[in-house]
Image (cartoon, grey):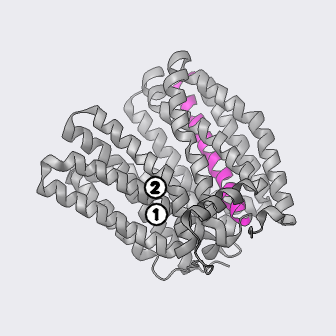
């Protein structure tokens, strides 16, 4: 059973890190635009926020296996605090260099995001013990709470302190995250280190030879593709198509984050009387229903409620997603496999944005959302059934695909 004190420190450190990330995501684009007056700089910064992380995940997985989750989490967050300290110093010393400092900072923080995510994946099995599903629910809740609290707290602080001071707040939050994880369990690899290219190839081979995890990666890609189109178009749908005020968009996103509180209350009760597979099926059904309703919504209220339904379903599905994939991967190679796994998942975000910019621009965003929702509901449901069947077979009777290649 997970130690309560250790679990609290784990959750507090994770929440501090996520709040800092959300604060930076809120402050940096505004600071770049206001400092430069050129929207192209903001576009460059946005691209640099996801591209380095996308490429860094497989390498971050190797680091997680080599050093263990606790050590990697603490060092990555300490490095993120140092990056912000340097950026803050440059911006105060040479204000004319602020834009360039912020762009370089975006690249560095993006690279360091991948090690943090891989460190969490590596640490959860050590922290959770027999309560793996509940611990994964805690991780999901921290992410949702940070989505709600981060932008709201950043906006409030910006009114009284200015946007540059937000970098100082994020710096302290990253440093606090590193301190919270001091003394937590750690499990560095005990095997002899091979070459980087060898380990990268091994991670991909382990993923491709693991039927349940591979099916889950493809299912996640399909789900994230639909959500990527939705998230990239939400602002247009709320303020453009439905003509609502900007505040409605903010409230909808805050409501999505506040689902973490509901998830925190519901998931332990749901797990008490249903299996992790039924919880995953319930979440998958709700997110499909929510996405279809978004594609059919005729008003802002129906659209916002449908979005919250889809996000709530996604939160329940992610408990199944996070829990089962860890069980089906050899612990010594968890990072090696999860790096490529995250890479496959994240590829859907730029693709979803491209679909919105091309097909959505030409034929309408709402028909695109409805088409992706139907694609997810019918073929995606078959893929979900295949995935759950493969997990049942693999976890009830471990297959050779889960073994470590010689």
Quadrant of the snapshot with the C terminus = bottom right
Q: Which residues are magenta?
A: 298-327
Out of 316 and 87, give the one closest to the viewer: 87
Q: Which residue does the image show at 60% across and 37% down from the upper left? A: 225
Q: Left or right of 227: which side holds 214?
A: right
Query: Residue 404 placed where, x, y %?
Result: 74, 69
- Establish if 77 lies above or below 67: above
**Residue 8 appearing in the image:** no
Question: What secondary structure is the magenta-colored segment mainly?
Answer: helix
Image quadrant assignment for residue 348: top right
Q: Earlier in the sequence, mark 2 or mark 1?
A: 1
- Establish if 59 lies above or below 226: below
Element type where label 1 sits in the image: helix
Query: Residue 98 placed where, x, y %?
Result: 19, 49
Q: Which residue does the image show at 81% across and 40% down from the upper left? A: 382
Q: Which mark is residue 15?
A: 1
Query: Residue 238 placed where, x, y %?
Result: 46, 28
Q: How many numbered marks are there?
A: 2
How crowded pointer 2 is (Cα within 10 Å; few <14, some 14-19, many 20+) is rated as: many
Image quadrant assignment for residue 261: bottom right
**Magenta stretch encompasses residue 139:** no
Q: Which residue does the image show at 18% across and 61% down from the upper left? A: 89
- To which residue does mark 2 refer? 146
**Magenta stretch encompasses residue 301:** yes
**Residue 29 appearing in the image:** yes
Out of 141 and 377, give the one closest to the viewer: 377
Q: Which residue does the image show at 80% across and 57% down from the upper left? A: 391
Q: Which mark is residue 40?
A: none
Q: Is disc 2 in contact with disc 1, using a CB cutoff of under 8 Å?
A: yes
CA distance separating discs 2 and 1: 7 Å
Q: Left or right of 25: which side holds 270?
A: right
Query: Residue 317 placed where, x, y %?
Result: 68, 50
């Amino acid at each position: 059973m997970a130690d309560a004190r250790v679990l609290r420190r784990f959750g507090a450190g994770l929440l501090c890190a996520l709040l800092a990330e959300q604060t930076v995501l809120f402050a940096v684009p505004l600071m770049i635009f206001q400092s430069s007056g050129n929207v192209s700089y903001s576009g460059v910064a946005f691209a640099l926020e996801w591209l380095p992380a996308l490429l860094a995940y497989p390498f971050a997985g190797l680091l997680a296996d080599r050093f263990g989750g606790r050590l990697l989490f603490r060092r990555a967050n300490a490095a993120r605090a140092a990056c912000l300290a340097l950026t803050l110093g440059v911006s105060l010393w040479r204000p004319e260099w602020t834009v360039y400092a912020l762009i370089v900072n975006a690249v560095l923080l993006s690279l360091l995001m991948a090690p943090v995510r891989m460190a969490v994946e590596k640490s959860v099995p050590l922290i959770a013990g027999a309560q793996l599903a509940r611990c994964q629910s805690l991780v999901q809740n921290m992410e949702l709470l940070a989505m709600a609290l981060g932008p709201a707290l950043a906006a409030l602080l910006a009114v009284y302190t200015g946007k540059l001071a937000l970098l100082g707040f994020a710096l302290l939050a990253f440093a606090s995250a590193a301190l919270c994880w001091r003394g937590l369990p750690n499990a560095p690899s005990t095997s002899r280190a091979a070459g980087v290219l060898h380990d990268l190839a091994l991670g991909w081979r382990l993923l491709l030879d693991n039927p349940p995890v591979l099916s889950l990666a493809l299912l996640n890609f399909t789900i994230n593709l639909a959500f990527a189109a939705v998230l990239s178009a939400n602002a247009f749908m709320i303020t453009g198509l439905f003509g609502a005020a900007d505040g409605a968009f903010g409230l909808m996103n805050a409501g999505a984050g506040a689902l973490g509180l509901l998830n925190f209350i519901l998931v332990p009760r749901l797990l008490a009387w249903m299996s992790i597979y039924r919880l995953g099926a319930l979440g998958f059904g709700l997110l499909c229903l929510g996405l279809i309703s978004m594609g059919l919504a005729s008003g802002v209220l129906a659209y916002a409620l449908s979005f919250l339904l889809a996000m709530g379903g996604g939160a329940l599905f992610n408990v199944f997603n996070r829990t089962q994939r860890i069980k089906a991967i050899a612990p010594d190679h968890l990072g090696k496999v999860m790096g490529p796994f995250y890479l496959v998942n994240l590829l859907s975000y730029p693709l979803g944005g491209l679909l919105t910019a091309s097909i959505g621009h030409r034929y309408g965003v709402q028909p695109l959302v409805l088409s992706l929702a139907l694609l997810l509901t019918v073929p995606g449901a078959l893929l979900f059934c295949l995935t759950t069947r493969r997990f049942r077979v693999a976890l009830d009777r471990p297959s050779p695909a889960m073994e470590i290649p010689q």
